[in-house]
Image (tube, grey):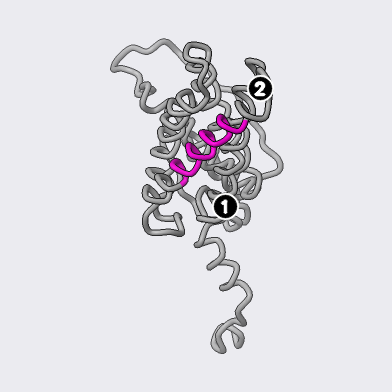
Amino acid sequence: MSGFFCLSRKTYEHAQRLTPLGYKIGLELMCKCRVRRVREIPILFGMRLKGQSKLSLKQQFRYLEHLSRLYDFRFPRASPAIKFLIATAASWLAGLATYALCRNAAIAYLPALAVTSVFHIRYVRTQRKFIARPRPWLDFAVISICEWLACLMMVAWTGRRIDRPTWLEGFLYPFAVATLLRYILRKELLQDIRGLRRDARAEELADSQPPPAAEAID
């Protein structure tokens, strides 16, 4: 919490794409310099005599956002899948609560889409410069409409094909099909490729190029 840390120049030169958010610069360096050994030297905090703490609620949310970015960096392929599951779980909980009231999966899927849109707002805000397609909100609208139509058709299919579907079947089948369609369309429209940065590809291409003649002579 003191903000005081040190590392060797050799370690610092291993850093990749430093983009710290908030005050946890040491955490950024530990992750992006691929630090393997960390030693903590304890310090003793005294009682505050003047001023106020800068650790506001906003800073705490920035810290969580920072952790999210570092997870994207450290696990570029697993991160989109994990965050998709988190967003799906949250949307399903909202849909399940609505379904318990109305017993109609097509109606219950609308709150689920609203929760998904909240996650999409955060995604666009934090990942805008890395998004491959120019109109992420248009893509999101198309995906959402296709999801809801799939859910609606599955509700109709369940009512015709299953004699007296159970409470769980009436909820699970439409939501599962709509979510599967969402996953496929997000992949096709290149949404949520958080860890697979375009600048990372540029760095890899630069590393694969032979050095200039002047540098080769040096």
> Secondary structure beneath disc 1?
helix
**Front-most of residues 62 and 170:** 170
- Disc 1 crowd, CA 10 A, few/some/many (<14, 14-19, 20+): few
Q: Earlier in the sequence, mark 1 or mark 2?
A: 2
User: Is disc 1 in contact with disc 2, using a CB cutoff of under 8 Å?
Assistant: no
Q: Amino acid at mark 1?
A: Lys
Residue occupying the point 41% across, 32% down: 118
Name the residue beneath numbered marker 1.
187
Which span of residues is magenta-colored? 143-157
Q: CA distance from mark 1 to mark 2?
A: 27 Å
Q: Is residue 189 above or below residue 41?
A: below
Could one spot residue 174 in this view of the protein?
yes
Residue occupying the point 58% across, 72% down: 205
Name the residue beneath numbered marker 2.
169
Residue occupying the point 47% across, 45% down: 143
- Please state if 7 lies on the left or on the right of 19 as rendered: right
> Dominant secondary structure of the magenta stretch?
helix
